[in-house]
Each structure stands twice: as C-alpha cells, then as structure tokens.
C-alpha cells in the first residue's frame, strides 16, 4: 500500500470505487438529461399535432389534378438526385418521372419545344422553385406556358431554357447565369423571378445574402474534421424543438423587432439592387436584356384570400420580414424606373380565386398562366423590336 509525502496511505480499491461512483453519477446525469430532452421533444411534437388536428383545412386546390398523387409521393421531386456544386451548393442530376424531366445540364423540360429552323429568340429563365415549377408538371411551369403563348402568337421558334432551381436565391441565379455564359450560352433575354428565397434564407440562416440550407451544407462538409462533441451536437438539427428555438432566436436577430427587421431588410434590399445592377451590366456588355421580376406572394398580395389561402401558415417572423423587404425594394427601385426591375407584387390583387398554394409563393396553374402572360408580353415586344415593328 503506497504512502504520500505526509505518510498517508492510498487505498487503490477505494480510489476505484470513488471513480466508479463519479462515472455512475455522470452517466446518470447524462441519461436523465437525454431522457428529459426526449420527453420535451415528444411533448412539443404532440402539442403541434394537437393544434394541427384542431384546424379545419380545405382540400388542396390541386388535389383533383392528374399529377397530384405523384407529387405528394415525391414531394415535387425537389429532393431528387443532385450533386455538389462548388459555386452554388447543389445542382440537380438528370432524372425523369411521369410528369417531370430534368436533362443532363440540370434544365427542367420546357414544352412545347421550339420548331426546327432559325431561332427567333433565346430566353434563359432563372429563379427558385416558383419559376422551376415545384407544384406543377412540365407542361404547366411558367416557361412552358410562355412557350405555349408565344406559339399561339406566331412565334414557334423561341428557345426557352428553364435554369431555375428549387430554393435558389438571386445570387445563385446570377452565378448560374455566369456559368452558362462561361459555357458559351448567348441568350437574348434573361428573366429572373426572385424575392421569397432572399428573405427566407436571411430569416433561417441569420444574415442577409445567405443561401437556403448553407448551414446544413457547412455541417455536412465539416464531417470528419469536427470533434466528437460537435458531431453529436449536429444531431440536434433533427429535433423539432431545437429547430423552433433556433428559429425563435433568429427571429429576434432578423425579424423580431421593428429595428432589426428594418436593418435586415435594408441589407437584403441593397444586395438585391446591386445584383440587379450587376445583371444589367452583364446584359449591356454581352447584348442581352435582363428582367428581374419580384415575385407575387401570399404574404404581400392585396387580393381577397380564398379559404385555402387563409389556411396557409408561415414560420414565425417571415410574413413581416417579406412585407417589409418588398416595400424597401420597391422604394429603392422606384428611384430608377428605367431599370430591369419589374414588381409583380400586386398583379393578383383583383383575383378572388385561389392563386397561392403555400407560404413559399408557389402558385396554381392559373397563377402561373398569369405570370407567363406578363412575360410573354415582354418577349413579344422584344421580338417586334428586333423585326423593326412597333411594339
């Protein structure tokens, strides 16, 4: 039995016993903490389910459409095959379903395709899931409806490329444009539909200019470089309660108060205005006409809401943030009425039917048709000016 400098004896057995007791206590605390966390998570999810069960939600406006069942199963194929892209975060791989097709270049199919012969106009579409056509089949996306209108007006050889992608913001759209130009594309017109994702990403990620999902992408890319504790903490993203607490914190930072909301919208709007200016500069240098459409949205429309639209719910802070940002962007762009910016915010104000499907601004085919009609008018004016005809 060993002695210390004071002659006191160490008892190895008692040391082991004390260490085991400490470990047992720590394990008990950890286990109780995990159990309490699971209990709180269960209670939070249960109360959410109970609140949802108490609400009467009308039938989805597209529930009777032929493509609806497949859309429900696949989630609009928004989670289809994709690959890592060093510039944009992700980019879709080629895939085909009954109602949706994405080619090898990542373009959503536009139908009808142009007729053979000299191309009358080349148009590149950019934006997020609204332009991509998240809730519709290929034939009812905005670019496809534009193609149909132009054909009916006597322009069957217009080449329309749908390069929009779900969750993309204005920055990612411009990066996509740069990559297309780098690859040799020479569009005559570039049309970008944005707004929702610029504001939503700022709310979710905590700063203006963010890309949706950038935090998750950063966590995934850091796997193998982080410590065990960080990897274990990363599991918290699967918790609905943790996500709600994070959203509450970010709401306080980004949209929780009038002051912080205003500062965030100023940043979002200034960045958007600079991106529009960058697109205009590219257009002047390379000979294409840019058009930046601020998308119509359920949160900013002045239309009388249908029963379905009244049932839509958004995450905390988002509605106020997008409304404020829309006002700021409009006021900044009003200073330059000759710019490439066009606001579609109020285009449905007189509609009483259902246009908006969810908090992200996805629209019914009727809504897509109206936007397509506005875009077709712009393209016909361009075609007529090229032909030397009065607009």
Image (tube, rainbow, N blue to C red):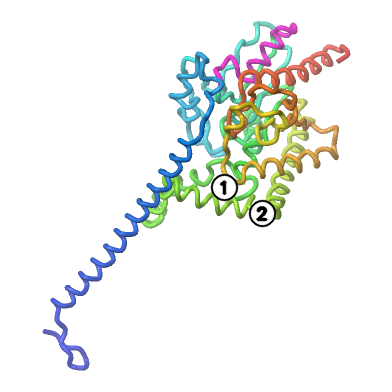
Q: Residue extending furthest bottom? A: 6
| Circle 2 crowding by C-alpha within 10 Å: few under 14, some 14–19, many from 20 | some
Which dot marks residue 205? Answer: 1
Magenta stretch encompasses residue 150? yes
Q: Nearer the viewer, mark 2 or mark 1?
A: 2
Look at 85% across and 40% down and name the residue there: 335
* 362 is higher (above) or lower (below) than 11: above
Where in the figure is residue 12, as x and y percent of width and height? 14, 78
Q: Residue at x 45, y 28 (%)?
A: 81
Compared with 289, 380 (above or below) is above
Decide if residue 194 is on the left or right side of residue 387: left
Q: Quadrant of the N terminus?
A: bottom left
Q: CA distance from mark 2 to mark 1?
A: 17 Å
**In what element is the residue under mark 1?**
helix
Q: How many marks?
A: 2
Nearer to us in this view, 57 or 243: 57
Q: Is residue 148 above or below residue 81?
A: above
Q: Farthest residue to the left: give it.
A: 1
Is the residue under label 1 in contact with that under label 2 (CB below 8 Å)?
A: no
In which quadrant of the rendered view does residue 114 lie?
top right
The magenta stretch is 136-156
The question of residue 296 being in magenta is answered with: no
Q: Main secondary structure of the magenta part?
A: helix
Judging depth in this view, the residue of 380 and 189 nearest the camera is 380
Q: Residue 309: which quarter of the image?
A: top right
Which residue is under mark 2? 257
Is residue 292 in view?
no
Indicate the position of residue 17 as horizontal and vertical percent values.
Answer: 17, 73
In this view of the protein, which residue sits in the foreground, 77 or 50? 50
């Amino acid at each position: 039995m060993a002695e210390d400098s004071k002659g006191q004896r160490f008892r190895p057995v008692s040391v082991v016993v004390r260490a085991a007791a400490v470990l047992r206590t720590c394990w008990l605390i950890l286990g109780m903490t995990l159990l309490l966390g699971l209990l709180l998570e269960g209670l939070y999810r249960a109360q959410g389910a109970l609140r949802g069960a108490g609400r009467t939600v009308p039938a989805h406006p597209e529930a009777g459409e032929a493509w609806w069942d497949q859309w429900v199963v696949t989630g609009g194929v928004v989670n289809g095959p994709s690959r890592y892209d060093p510039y944009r975060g992700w980019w879709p791989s080629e895939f085909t379903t009954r109602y949706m097709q994405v080619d090898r270049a990542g373009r959503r199919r536009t139908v009808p395709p142009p007729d053979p012969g000299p191309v009358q106009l080349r148009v590149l579409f950019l934006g997020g899931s609204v332009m991509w056509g998240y809730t519709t089949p290929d034939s009812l996306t905005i670019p496809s409806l534009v193609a149909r209108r132009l054909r009916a007006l006597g322009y069957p050889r217009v080449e329309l490329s749908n390069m929009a992608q779900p969750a993309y913001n204005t920055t990612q759209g411009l990066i996509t444009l740069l990559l297309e130009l780098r690859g040799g594309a020479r569009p005559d017109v570039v049309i970008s539909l944005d707004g929702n994702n610029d504001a939503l990403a700022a709310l979710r990620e905590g700063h203006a200019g963010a890309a949706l999902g950038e935090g998750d992408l950063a966590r995934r890319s850091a796997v193998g470089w982080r410590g065990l504790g960080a990897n274990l903490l990363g599991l918290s993203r699967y918790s609905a309660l943790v996500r709600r607490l994070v959203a509450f914190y970010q709401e306080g930072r980004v949209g929780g108060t009038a002051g912080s909301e205003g500062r965030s919208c100023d940043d979002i709007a200034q960045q958007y205005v600079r991106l529009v200016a960058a697109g205009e500069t590219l257009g002047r240098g390379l000979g294409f006409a840019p058009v930046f459409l601020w998308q119509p949205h359920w949160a900013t429309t002045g239309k009388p809401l249908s029963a379905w639209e009244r049932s839509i719910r958004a995450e905390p802070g988002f509605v106020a943030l997008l409304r404020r940002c829309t006002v700021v962007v409009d006021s900044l762009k009003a200073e330059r009425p000759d710019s490439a910016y066009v606001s579609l915010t109020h285009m449905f104000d007189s509609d009483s039917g259902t246009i908006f499907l969810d908090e992200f601004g996805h629209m019914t085919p009727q809504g897509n048709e109206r936007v397509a009609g506005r875009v077709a008018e712009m393209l016909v004016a361009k075609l007529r000016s090229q032909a030397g005809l009065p607009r």
